[in-house]
Amino acid sequence: MTASLTTEPAWKKLAAHHNQIKDRHLRDLFAADPGRGEALSVEAEGIFLDYSKNRIDSETLSLLVELAETAGLKDRIEAMMTGQKINTTEQRAVLHTALRAPRDAKIEFDGQNVVPEVHAVLDKMTRFSDRLTSGEWTGHTGKRIRNIVNVGIGGSDLGPVMAYEALRHYSNRDLTFRFVSNVDGTDFAEATRDLDPAETLFIIASKTFTTQETMTNARTARAWLLEGLGADDSAVAKHFVALSTNAEEVAAFGIDTDNMFGFWDWVGGRYSMDSAIGLSTMLAISPERFREMLAGFHAMDVHFRSAPLARNLPVIMGLLNVWYVNFFGSQTVAVLPYDQYLKRFPAYLQQLTMESNGKSVTLAGDRVNYDTSPIFWGEPGTNGQHSFYQLIHQGTHLIPCDFIAFAKSLNPIGDHHDKLNANVFAQGEALAMGKTRQQVLDEGTSEALAPHRVFEGNRPSNTLLIEELTPAVLGKLVALYEHSVFTQGVIWQINPFDQWGVELGKVLAKRIVPELQSDDGELQHDSSTNGLIRRYRSLKA
Ligand code: F6P
């Protein structure tokens, strides 16, 4: 495909088709085809996706698939999964799928099969996990480790914290897990205030081992530990492990590289929760369950690679986002898990989706003339229903929603679960079908109030219905969104695997730190920034 995506025949056909279909109401589409719900559903690897409540017909999907074919999606998937350097702006391969490949798989990068290395790290993590949970690994004073504090940010935090929360049902309740990410000292203080240093292990998670926030928190953790134990640096070895690609910096920090769990530059930070970065997850749920999670990831990888595009879950979900962003002008997608354990899933997806596809330049370096990543946001249901759903139902924005629901509760109590799921099904129905003025009047509502009580409907949603939340299912769900992101990136011809957009703020912050710590020197910023720095100095004095 050329850089001018919008001049592609497949794109033009979609634009013309959009003109024909854009005013059709989901009410009418369902009325016209009693089999629509079934026809526009697909199941793979135990994940059932009902996408019939989208503003599409069967032609829409064919045209979107044609767009994906024109974009060479199949070839791009192969290029990614076979270790080609598709992250061209960083000259890196993108092989997170190798992290969950079975032991006997062969995935070559630069002439080397990477799978044995992946499993060597998993085995090392397993040995460490077994030693720690059995009590063989103790702290400096000989006390058993009971608290695990993961120190990391971005992909080195959001994956671990999301997975811990998601799989808490399966977790070892004898261990306490905390996650420190923010350079705001409050995060560290609150995470550690009730912990005994003698029983605490810090996992310093950082791909680069240079991230300002993580290294600041890591140094604070070391000082907190040594002060608490009244010990010297030799105590660090029993209370600190590192997850990183950067052995040199790990050693420079003072962590023995024997206590380092490595990964590789072909794993992006936001694609790393199934690498060594998942050590806290493994400690929480056990190595066996961690491997079940990896098997779930892998099952979705296989589906993505092999299923026909029109029956391919991540492809369908990715193409639907393209449909709404580029043809309906939608700006956001709401992710609404009806499961309290998935409370951090939307936050996790924010990094995965927006750090990946929040780009405005094509792989060839041209400014795009179409929109790219939508803004992802969300909260678990039913809580969101009582806060922001008003806007989704009656506001002026068209917000496609992903509902995620489970048939079985991990905490079955009375009729809670039926009520929970009655709500998720009701929301999808209400958004799609709405309520007409006539229906409102027939209920006895006055003419004056009727406009306020009308629901336009025709608001799209996907529903993912899954039997039960397990480690394997979590792996499948994450891989589903990873590959949906990839699909969108391929259509938009952007690189989902770099993140240059985070650099400028980092550089400026480094420059500003000394300016906040002294009153000397001319400030060279704009008048707003200079004024804020001066006011900060005087307020904190
Ligand atoms: O600043 C963004 C980022 O580079 C993310 O891409 C990454 O997940 C995060 O920072 C943390 O990076 P690291 O794991 O190297 O500390």
Image: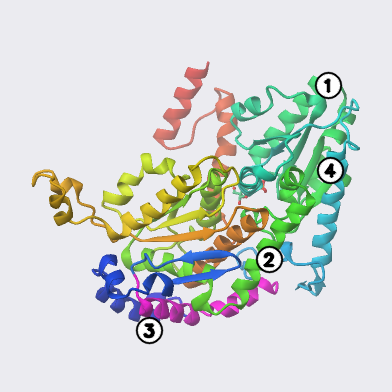
Magenta region: which residues?
Answer: 56-85
Which residue does the numbered mark 1 point to in the structure image? Answer: 229
Asked if labels 2 and 4 touch by Cβ distance under 8 angstroms, the answer is no
The mark that comes first in sequence, 3 or 1, is 3
Mark 4, secondary structure of its residue: helix
Camera-side mark, 2 or 1: 2
Alpha carbon of mark 4 to alpha carbon of mark 1: how far?
A: 22 Å
Disc 3/disc 2 C-alpha distance (Å): 35 Å
* Residue position marked by numbered label 3 in the rendering: 9
Given this view, does label 3 or label 2 mark the residue nearer the observer? 2
Q: Quadrant of residue 445?
A: top left
Which of marks 1 and 4 precedes in the sequence?
Answer: 1
Report the Cα–Cα distance between label 2 and label 1: 43 Å
Query: Residue 458 is drawn in which quadrant?
Result: bottom left
Q: Amino acid at mark 3?
A: Pro
Residue 251 disc label: 4
Label 3's element? helix
Question: How many residues crowd around disc 1 within 10 Å: few (fewer than 14), some, or many (20 or more)?
Answer: some
Q: Earlier in the sequence, mark 2 or mark 1?
A: 1
Of residues 311 and 160, the one nearer the viewer is 311
- Residue 214 location in percent, x, y? 67, 39
Q: Is residue 515 magenta?
A: no
- Counting residues from the start of the chain, the first of labels 4 and 2 encountered is 4
Residue 362 seen by the camera: no
Secondary structure at numbered mark 2: helix
